[in-house]
Amino acid sequence: MTREKFMTTISFVRAGAALSLGPGLGVHPERQAVPIAPGRRAAPAPGLHDALRERARAAPEATAFYFIDTDERLSTLTNAALLAHARAAAGALARRGVGSGARVLLSFATGPDVVVALFGCVLLGAVPILLEPPFASKRALSWRSRAAAILRGAGARALIVEASLHEQAETVARGAAAPPVLVPADLAGSDDFDDEPAPAPDALAFIQYTSGTTSEPRGVMVSHRALLANARGIGEISGYREGELSLGWLPLHHDMGLVGVVLAPFLHGLPVALLPPLSFVLRPQRWLWAMHHLRGALSPAPNFAYQLCLGKIGDDQLAGLDLGAWRLAYNGAEFIDAGTVAAFRRRFGPYGLPARSVHPVYGMAEFVLAATFPAADSEPRVDFVARERLNRDGVAAPVAPDDPAALAFVGVGRPFPGHAMKIVDAAGVALPERVQGQIVLRGPSLTEGYVGDPDASAAALRDGWLCTGDLGYVADGELFVTGRCKELVVKAGRNYHPQALEAAAGRVPGARAGCIAAFGEYDPADGTEAVVVVVETAETGRDALARLARAVERAVLAETGLRPDRVVLVAPRSLPKTSSGKLQRLEIRDLTRADRLRDLMPRDA
């Protein structure tokens, strides 16, 4: 049966009119009556398998997913249609020899097809692995390389890809164990698949490949037990309410996109709205107007996204915007800048953004997603500490907010009930409050380890604790993240956090905030590290570039007490990032060392 025929027999998606995500847009008819006032708490289902079937039974015509594509066309998928198509997808996989426990690689742009394939795996009991599709032809080679590595490493038994990737996926499959390659049309057919029993709690729910900011990407194994524990914790601390909508543009191969936007809310019976990542990057206001149109209550994003909204959206693009339903604007997945948090609240407060909506959080794929959350109704807490004490002794000594030598760190809350956290030194000994060390975590959200990499698993999981590689300290029971262990800049015996240097440089006009990397490069002549700051800029001309370099030096010195030894100015989109948008500092350091980044500023300037 062709996909076109299938779509006429079972409504795949309900197509709506094209939107205009900007001034003049009203509220979607289905979302107009949703109350903003606190209502009934949403209870989690026992698992994804049960949630999918129960939602289709209890409310078959209710919308499970809203999709807004890059052309701003809206479509919806009901609970009944989702179950029917997931059954068809599961049956298509089963007919090709894929069974419960088998690993399946999915590579799609954000849209209905990836959701159907994902939940087809859920019904079958298969283990999905989501891989970012290439967004440009020049990235096709890296996609094939990564797909081949995942096939080999994870032992995937099938590939499901969007139609445009079929030929490339066939090439990858022939180079591996020749697993079947399917496209969306192959998943269409009868929905008479007999559901497999719900997987055991210790069975794998999915495999999440990490972004690879400081190492090669690794496949994090996430069990159903861990997923449910994390989703319950998120829902409990966030206070999910019946009828609230989760909305996001983050890619689903990223843990914040997959779990934070989709799976945790879905397990609690909440509808989900998805935008493609490119839609946000091209026009950040689309995110805010989608929240307005669908009365979104829950939406996560990394810090750079909030900064992008501040810098790229003009007041004329906000007329009539109402963000009053946005109860929790989660900020996580990368270092959180206190200035960005404050500026976002100021800028969008007049557009209805609740004063306590900005919600700094901390987590990683090895803990499913979330490790610490603040209380849902709390104000973001900013801790001001003495720069010199932290850099020299690792002590976070409080100082006044207006102290010119203060460093500002944002609180990211406490562990979920049943989970634990501590700060340890290099020997693993627990440290007292306000002493910086490595963050380690324990609890039912913990990963099973890395696929096919027992050495990396043993290094990360020690005596039941996850060694995160992140630095932080605890004050009054709340966690403050300060940086990465491997990325500290050591200058004259003092430790400096690259995020602080980057944030200072990012406030200089002409520098592209979020596209700046700071690192140390050992200088044998001085016997210490030279501090290098690499800055993307659209500036051109020798004089303008020279002024920018000097301004960056002054700004970094004024805010951190450390003068960069070298400022490298590069063109926009020069710096490598992970698939989730995080800067790869160590790779940038290596590229700079090898003189493979084109410095716009002549060395003799």
Image (cartoon, helix red, strand yellow):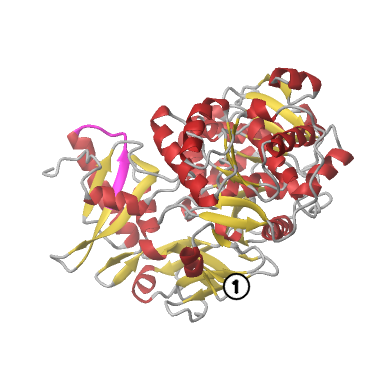
Q: Which residue is mark 1?
A: 477
The magenta span reads: 533-541
Q: Is residue 9 above or below residue 451?
A: above
Residue 538 position in % (x across, y down): 31, 34
Q: Quadrant of residue 23?
A: top right
- Foreground of the two, 164 or 37: 164
- Foreground of the two, 221 or 524: 221
Residue 26 visible (yes or no): no
Q: Quadrant of the N terminus?
A: top right
Q: Is residue 156 above or below residue 563?
A: above
Decide whether residue 539 is among the magenta residues. yes
Q: Quadrant of residue 499?
A: bottom left
Residue 532 position in % (x across, y down): 26, 54
Q: Is residue 76 above or below residue 604?
A: above
Question: Is 416 left or right of 579, judged from the image as shown?
Answer: right
Decide whether residue 402 is among the magenta residues. no
Residue 488 position in % (x across, y down): 35, 64
Residue 464 visible (yes or no): yes
Residue depicted at x 57% and y 47%: 345
Crowdedness near tag 1: few (<14), some (14–19) or many (≥20) residues, C-alpha within 10 Å: few
Which element is circle 1 on?
A: loop
Image label count = 1
Identify which amino acid the numbered label 1 is placed on.
Gly
Q: Quadrant of the C terminus?
A: top left
Question: Is 440 left or right of 543, judged from the image as shown?
Answer: right
